[in-house]
Image: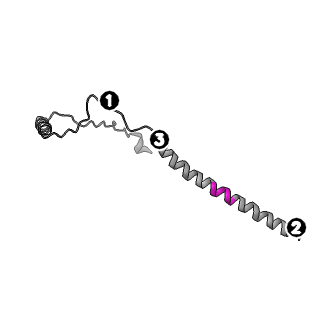
Amino acid sequence: MALKFFHLPRAKRFNVPYRFYDPDKEEREERERQIREEMGIFDTPDPNKPFKPNLKGQFRQSMGRASKSAEDTRRSSQWRLIILIITLSLVFYFFFYR
C-alpha cells in the first residue's frame, strides 16, 4: 500500500499511423489505369449509372433464417409440452381411477 502511494499513472498513448504521399505508387497506378483503358478493361462502374448498394432486404433475409430456426425450436417445445401433458394425464388417470 505504501508503494502505491507514490505511484503516478502514465499518460495514455495515442497512436496515429503516418500518412504519406508515395509518388512511385501514384505513377504505377496511373500507368496501370492507362494500360487497362487501352486494353478495354474497365474496373470502375459507368459514371452515368447511379450507385445502388446491395442492401435491400439483407436484414430481413438474415432474420428470416433466424426466425425459422426459432420457429422450429418453438414448435418442438410445444410438442414436448403436449407429450408431457398427455403423459401426466395418463399417470393421473391410472393412479386415481384404477
Q: Depth-wise, is mark 2 or mark 3 nearer the camera?
A: 3
Residue type (three-letter) at the residue carrying disc 2: Phe
The residue carrying mark 3 is 59
Q: Residue 15 location, x and y as percent?
A: 28, 37
In x, y percent, where is residue 85? 75, 60
- The residue that mark 1 highlights is 50
Q: In which quadrant will I find the C terminus?
A: bottom right
Predominant secondary structure, magenta span: helix
Give yes or no for residue 78 being in the magenta stretch: yes
Question: Residue visible at 23% across and 36% down?
Answer: 44
Seen as rendered, the residue at the extreme bottom is 98
N-terminal of the pair, mark 2 or mark 1, is 1
User: Magenta stretch?
Assistant: 75-80
Between residue 18 and residue 64, name the one nearer to us. Answer: 64
Task: Identify which amino acid the numbered label 1 is placed on.
Answer: Pro
Where is 48 relative to 34, above or below? above
Q: What residue type is labelled 3?
A: Phe
Coloring scheme used: one colour
Q: Say how many tags the image has.
A: 3
Residue 46 lies, in percent from the top left, at 25, 32
Provide the residue designation for mark 2: 96
Q: Distance between the residues labelled 3 and 1?
A: 23 Å
Q: Identify which residue is drawn at 16% across, 39% down.
A: 40
Question: Is 63 colored magenta in this rendering?
Answer: no
Q: In this view, does 33 lie to the left or right of 59?
A: left
Using the rendered view, name the quadrant where residue 79 is placed.
Answer: bottom right
| In the displayed structure image, the side of residue 1 where residue 84 appears, left or right | right
Instruction: Describe residue 21's horizontal placement relative to residue 74 as left or right.
Output: left
Front of the two marks 2 and 1:
1
Tell me the SS state at disc 2. Answer: helix
